[in-house]
Each structure stands twice: as C-alpha cells, then as structure tokens.
Image (cartoon, rainbow, N blue to C red):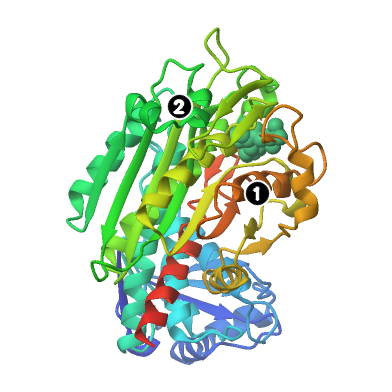
Amino acid sequence: MKFKLDASNIAKQKTDCVIIGIFENGDLTPSAHALNKISKGFLQNLIKNGEFQGKSGQTLLLYAVPHVRFQRVLLVGCGKNAPLTARDYRKLMHASINALSNTKVAHVATFLTELEVEKYEFPWKIKHAVEVIRAATYRFDRFKSKKEPSLHLKEIILYSPEDKATKVALKQGLAIADGVEYTKNLANLPSNICTPTFVATEAKTLVKEHPALSIKVLEEKDMRKLGMNALLAVAKGSAQNPKLVCIEYHGGPKKEAPIAFVGKGITFDTGGISLKPADSMIGMKYDMCGAATVLGVLKTAAELKLPLNIVGVLALAENMPSGTACKPEDIVVTMSGQTVEIMNTDAEGRLVLSDALTYVERFKPDTVIDIATLTGAVVVALGFHVSGMLSNHQPLAEDLLAAGQESHDRIWQLPLWDEYQDQIKSPFADMSNVGGRSAGTITAACFLSRFAKKFRWAHLDVAGTAAMMAGGNDRYATGRPVPLLIQYLIQRAEQKDA
Ligand code: BES
Ligand code: MN
Ligand code: ZN
C-alpha cells in the first residue's frame, strides 16, 4: 500500500474513491462543499432527506454520484462542527478505511486530513493518518488455510500541503507502522512456534537487514558464567533454552552513551509451579510483547536513521512447571549479587528483567527503559487504554508522558515511593519477588528499581495495552508501545539538534 501527499483540491483529484467529512448539523467540510457543488446539490439533498446524519464515525458509501468523476464517494460523519480530539480524528480515519474493506476500491483520496484537530497541525495529522490506516488494514492470517479476502487498497492519497514537515511526518508514520506491524507479527505467533530460540533467530534476521545494527546472543552457559541466576531460575522448568539477545544500533557519535531498551520476553507464561488457572493462561503467548516491542523500535529507528545510539536487550525464556522448575521459597543470587526469595513463580517477569537490567549496565547507558507485560494489577488500575509508567527520574518520566500524548500511545505515571518497598521484604533473602495483594504494579516496579540504581530508568507495564488478552475471540497484539518509544527517540534526537 502506497501513501502520497497531494495538495490539489477535490475538483482536481483523479482517483476511484474520495473520502469526505460531513458534520452532524449538516455543515459541510470544504471538500464536501466542493463536491456538493460539482454534483449540483446531491449531497445537500441527501442530508436534507435524512439519509446521512453526520454522527461521529457514521459512514455511507455512495456509488455513481451525478456529475462526479469518482466512481465512489465515502461520506464520513464527523460529529459536531468543532475541532476534533486526537482520539476522534483517529477514530474517523479508522472507520473510513473499515467502510472500504469489502469493496474493490484500489485508489482512494482522503480529505479527512482537512479536519481541524485540537492542538495539532498537518504533520501530526499525516503521521497519524498513516499509522491508523496501516493498523486498519493489518491482517494476521498466516494460519488460516482460507485467507480472508485480500484488501484491494493500493494507493492512499492524503490531502495535505507538501512541505518539509509533512514529508518528514509521512516518512515517520510509515516507519512507525512498519515497526508496529513487525511487533504485532511476532507477538501474534503462538508459543509452539515463537520460542526464545525462534525470537533470537528473528532478531538475527532483522539485524542482517540493517547495516547499522549488530547483535550478540547469550546462551544458557554464557548466562551461567555471568551469574544470571534469576533469569535461569525462570527458564529451568522449560524444555526451551533461554536466550539473552543484545542488539546495538549505532546512529550517533561513537562515544555517545546509548539509550537502552530492555524487553520482557516470556514466550509463554504458565505461571510455573505457581500455576495459573486455565482461563488466566489465555493470552500468555503475548508475555513476550516487551521483547517484540524492542525489536520493532530498533527496526523503526534503523529505518529512520535516527542520530542516536540505542541498545536493545531481550530477556527470553518460557515459564513452565516441571520436575526441574524452580519452586516457591527457592532463593537465587541474582547477577547483581542481591538475593531473591521466589515466593511466587508466576512473578517471573521481574526475575528475568532483574538480570537483564544488571547486564545492561555494561553499555553505560544514558537512559534505560524496560517494557514488560508485568502485572495483571496494571489492568485493574488503568484498564486497557493506557500503559503504567514508573521511573526513578522525573524529567525522564515527563519526557515519556509528553511522547505518550503526541503519539496517542498514552501512559500514566504511578508513584515509586519508598513506602512500597517494605512490601517486598523477605525474612530469608534481600527481597521477595512478590509484594502482596495491594499495589501490585508498584511493588513489581519497586523490585525492578533495585536493579536500576546505576542509571536513569523508566519502567513501562504494558500488560493491558500490548495486546488484548481477554479470553474469547477478541485477542490480538496492538504493537504498543512502539509509537510511544519512537516518539520519545524522535524527541531525544530533536533535543540534540536544539
Ligand atoms: N505475565 C503476567 C502478567 C499479566 C497478567 C500480563 C495478565 C497480561 C495479562 C505476569 O508474569 C504475572 O503472572 N504476574 C502476576 C504477579 C503476581 C504473581 C505477583 C499477576 O499479575 O498476577
Ligand atoms: Mn507470570
Ligand atoms: Zn509473565
């Protein structure tokens, strides 16, 4: 699917289909107005007769509108005639593409980009149009013997001025969509295919495609030498070998300290000996979304040639119960030297991350951000709409919050205050890996914070946002928080310019 910017008005467009907005009170957007004129009042008549109310998200596909050269015209309701919120703009964009999903339309020009959006200008509208349209047309049918009817959409023309800023926005939108799709494709794979070894091989393939990337994969024996006993304890019950994948992206000056991303990569989380109930296991193939996100971010960063140095570390293991699995009350010495009493083998994410965070110290990172489907508690606190964020450095937290708004891949900060640290005390080891029923997301972050003392660090708990994991048929990876993290990197690159 190709995207093009085009500043010519609707009268000059040549395409199969145009998408135009209509407000709820019958007000026409500029292009709807123009088309109404060309069609000698056809649209206004239709609205007057009550055929289309303009309710936000409503769509109506018209065929052979008189005097109009496009075969089809798609009307999209825009609600009240006022600047749209970011969310509404994205919603309308999504609805408009969905409305074309069972048609033969191959070439389309959308004029929804002319709608006013609170706070945002054309570059933002272009970037988000691309991301939303690519998400609306994403399919994962690798394992369907009968493929869903393929989309006919080949070219999308976005009504927009063609200047430097909109061209950059288009490029960024496309690269973000590539990263998001990469992450979704990997995350959507079942765990009988997507094992730690499989992810490591995928990572190698990605690295081969981009000369600015290099990779090192640590095997079990390497991890043993380094004393990564927390990560190894999680992997112990599984027939699958754990892997620690380290990828470096060099886009900045050689000596510049990198920004590091650490991803939780549990390719399946049964809970281990603290076994999950059957229903709670559904969606646990998505417990590697943190790792998949790190790969998606690296892909996009490389595509955009961001002038930064980046490190990505994936902590890959499978959490299984077996005769060789670690057990409740087992004590391990982590790579940092701190000891942990494993009170619940289902709190495995923080165990693999603890050693990965210690490992990342060797890159002398400027900033470390970990991404993890870490706690069910974050879904209780924030639902499926925003990711939880905790940090030991407030300016970093604020940069991430801003990136969340701009990318619409939003996050919300939770406190990391000392009071909560008491909850992870253990009578036998330096800490327990669980902190009781209350504030589960915060106590998980407290645990991680003990392995993140040597750098500015933020933790993203994406258990509610990386994938829809509710049972039933509504299960899919979202590719989040790739857009958030790319926006953060873009901001970092801009700060360097300034
Ligand atoms: N992978 C889960 C967290 C999770 C839950 C992700 C639901 C997505 C949806 C994590 O490893 C886990 O099991 N956490 C436990 C922690 C508890 C044992 C302290 C949880 O949230 O119940
Ligand atoms: Mn678990
Ligand atoms: Zn888990």
Residue type of the residue flagged with mark 1: Ala
What secondary structure is marked by label 2? Answer: loop
Of the numbered discs in the image, which one, if any, rests on residue 445? Answer: 1
Residue 310 in view (yes/no): yes
Mark 2 or mark 1, earlier in chain? 2
Can you give x and y, in whole percent of width and height, for residue 302 in the image?
27, 61
Whether ligand 3 has any atom under 8 Å from the Cβ at mark 2 is answered as no
Q: Hey, which residue is sitting farthest top in the picture?
A: 323
Q: Nearer the viewer, mark 2 or mark 1?
A: 1
Residue type of the residue flagged with mark 2: Ser
Q: Which residue sits at x=58%, y=43%?
A: 373
The N terminus, quarter of image:
bottom left
Can you give x and y, in whole percent of width and height, for residue 380 in the image?
76, 46
- The crowding category of the residue bearing disc 2, from other C-alpha atoms within 10 Å (few below 14, some 14 to 19, many at least 20), is many
What secondary structure is marked by label 1? Answer: helix
In the rendered image, the vertical position of residue 90 relative to residue 194, given as above or below: below
**Front in this rendered view, residue 365 or 265:** 365
The C terminus, quarter of image:
bottom left
**Is 179 placed left or right of 429 in the picture?**
left
In the rendered image, the vertical position of residue 117 relative to residue 190, given as above or below: below
Q: Which residue sits at x=71%, y=84%?
A: 25
In which quarter of the view is residue 239 placed?
top left
Can you give x and y, in whole percent of width and height, for residue 165 in the image?
36, 86
**Is 346 placed left or right of 15 in the picture?**
right
C-alpha distance separating marks 2 and 1 = 26 Å
In the rendered image, the vertical position of residue 272 relative to residue 408, given as above or below: above
**Front in this rendered view, residue 347 or 157:** 347
To which residue does mark 2 refer? 191
Name the quadrant where ligand 2 sits. Answer: top right
Residue 140 in view (yes/no): no
In the rendered image, the vertical position of residue 332 relative to residue 498, given as above or below: above
